[in-house]
Amino acid sequence: MLFNSFEFLLFLPTFFLFYWFLFKKLRAQNILILVSSYVFYGWWDWRFLILILISTIVDYSIGILLDKEKKNKKRKYLLWVSLIFNLGLLAFFKYFNFFIDNWIEAWSSVGVVMHKSSLNIILPVGISFYTFQTLSYSIDVYKNKLKPTKNFIAFASFVSFFPQLVAGPIERATNLLPQFYKERTFKYELAVSGVKLIFWGLFKKIVIADNCAIYVNEIFGTYHEQSSLTLILGAVYFAFQIYGDFSGYSDIAIGTSRLFGFKLMRNFNYPYFSRDIAEFWRRWHISLSTWFRDYVYIPLGGSRGSKWMQIRNVFIIFLVSGFWHGANWTFVIWGGLNALFFLPLLLTNNNRKHINISTQNRLLPSIKEVLQIILTFSLTTIAWVFFRANTVNEAVAYILKIFGNQNLFHVDYLSGIERYSFEIVFLIPILCFFEWIYKKHETPFEGKCKRVNEAVILILLLVFGQFTNHSSFIYFQF
Amino acid sequence: MRNFFKYIILRLVVLLLMLFLLDLLFTTIYAKKKGIRNKIEFVFQNSAKKYDYIFLGSSRVEYHVDTELIDKSIQKKSLNMGISGQDITETFLLLKLLINKNFKAKKYFIQLDESDFSLVNEKSFIGASYFMPYVDNDEVKNHLEKYDDDFFLDTKTPFYRYMNYGYKIGYRELLLKINNKTRREKFYIGLKPVLKDNKASYLFKDKYNNHLLNEIKSFAKAKNLELVFFTSPYYNPQKTATYKKFAKNNNIKQYIDSIKNAKYFKDSSHLNYLGARKFTEMFIRDFALEF
């Protein structure tokens, strides 16, 4: 079920009424969450519910066994069982064909021809998200950061909680699980902030991302015929498409959770206003970045040790993060590029220079800040080309075409077919304007002019929203 | 909770008001602003026109029948009324509107795709967007009531039609309309690209029904119209035997495999302008031979 679908429009209020009026007891509410989450997920493909159920049972059992077991060696074995099971699921469903293809290709490069009998493996939606969430539970219990739960319903609801099941935010058990134990009461302010987030998320998805997608698909699909400026626009549009798509999804997920008394972590914090790559990664997909920081980077030694060790750790975390996104070398290169962009900051010890949002107490940034923001955005946009392209060769050709094109400034995708019009040219600045002015808030529906902003965004949503061409969220595929 | 419901209800009221206002704005502009952007507007802004031939159908008329060539070659007056994405139910509605607005032709050529006879849902109106600003017109309303599954949403829910069919009658089309971007009156559009994939093909189905075709025939009989049905060429059509038999039984002139060279195609179901020229010449020759 998609957040931007008619089914969800019926599902959400029905669930809301049942949740607050019929199922008032904590246990009953948790059971309702569990059943509804399975319905929500099963709407896409009910067969893969079994995977979530097995994953839930395995990590729930391991949690209990870890609590009982006092010997370190046996506790370590139990942790390995969880790691192997969760990563094994991921490896099989997400990476099996990738490994087979690369294995065959590697042998063929030395003259050995192997024939592939490929398996038609469907990637279960959200597998990368819920496996990481359950893994964090087992690791936290192993490290005694969290008491394991004996409440199976609460744990199963935590794993399958529908607002964030398929594309995050990847919640830590330490934050989300305890919320399933506590009596939840309806809070007006929390629910209203949730509605505002849902509304803002829908705007980002349906207006920004889905409109950008029309142009991005056209430009990336015919990049070899396009001029330099068109290709640059295509890459910029994709930067906003993926931002609108994923941050929009996160906002809707967080907002939906608030309607039911849950508080999820913030996943995006105005990343395109970052002044360097390190700041960008503190503001982009925060739940994944912090997951890798806590469970991969720090155990590897983090920023301790020699410079070489630090560089190694940075590359590992970015490459693994890239690979997490998909079984394609394009994602690995995307991760590698981000590591490269991060490197100068690490070497000059400037990677923690920009902690707060830029121009926190001023309206206008300095020229230096503007240049820093433009540079950071340009670097991430170059990396996004690899993220969007189907193959590494295609991404390289796309970038080379930008620089090696005779026809530098002719924007030809705007001419010819009337369907391709001009709305993005002002919709993106509108998004940037609202985000810049209201960067101290979660949405433009707080602070000054909030009512006017609500009306403006509503009109933009109704007039410019893509309601029939609505596409699935990009991050569902990961 | 009460305050929360008040908050939600207030916003729903604003939403509803906004939908009404936007619907009024869009409909008024489409109805009142002169200048022709599409063929439905052409019909609504004109009446009592006479032609020798009027061609109706989908993109496989819009891009395939070079009416300028017909007029020049055989000194006739023809009109290309093909609309991209249109299926048989919408073509039927356009025919009704033409008759209603007194557009007369000696012959009405109706292009029907093989997919028109294998519709899973004969009440889907995906391509008919251009009709939607005119849902208050009796002919349109009555037709939609009979053939549109989403009749209530399309005609009674404010602004839904402009959101649902935004691709064709949304803000882009509205802005072009406001800016007086008009279309060529003859309406034929020649496509430039050439099919790159020589291995492309078009697979025919193995089951067809003539239910809607018979309704069109009954309508034509009642109105004393001369209709000619035909099916345009496909590139490399596969498993065509059932359709050919169906076409023969239902008096549909089929050209499905009449053009074979990839250089005449844009894709497996669309000719480019070279193909359109070839196809139209073929058509002109057949007029002399058969009609």
Image: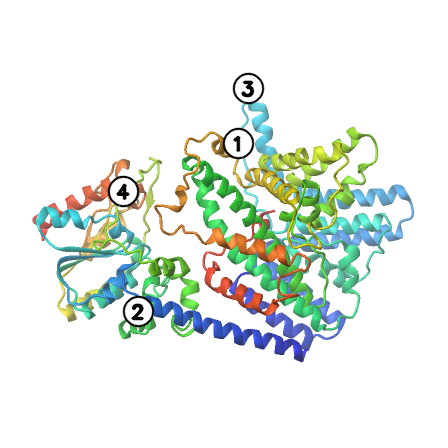
Please state which amino acid type lies under the numbered disc 2.
Lys
What residue sits right under mark 1 in the picture? A396
Question: Crowding near pointer 3: few (<14 within 10 Å), some, many (20+)?
Answer: few
Q: Is residue A360 visible?
A: yes
Q: Looking at the image, is mark 1 or mark 3 earlier in the sequence?
A: 3
Closest to the camera, between mark 1 and mark 2, is 2
Identified by mark 1, the residue type is Val
Q: Position of residue A395 (x, y in %)?
A: 52, 35
Q: Crowding near pointer 2: few (<14 within 10 Å), some, many (20+)?
A: few
Q: Is residue A380 above or below residue A426?
A: above
Query: What residue is shown with label 4?
Result: B272
Q: Which residue, given by chain and number where applicable, does mark 2 sit on?
A: B32
User: Disc 4 residue type?
Assistant: Asn
Q: Nearer the viewer, mark 4 or mark 1?
A: 1
Quadrant in the picture for residue A353: top right
- Check contact, mark 1 vs mark 2: CB within 8 A: no
Comparing marks 3 and 4, which lies closer to the viewer? 4
Asked if the residue at tag 3 contacts the one at tag 1, i.e. Cβ–Cβ closer than 8 Å, the answer is: no
- Please state which of residues B132 and A37 is positioned toward the viewer in this rendering: B132
Is residue A249 visible to the viewer in this orientation of the structure?
no
Distance between the alpha carbons at the discs numbered 4 and 1: 32 Å
x and y, in percent, of residue B126 in the image: 37, 60
Mark 4 nearby-residue class (10 Å; few <14, some 14–19, many ≥20):
many
Secondary structure beneath dot 4 equals loop
Residue wearing tag 3 = A111
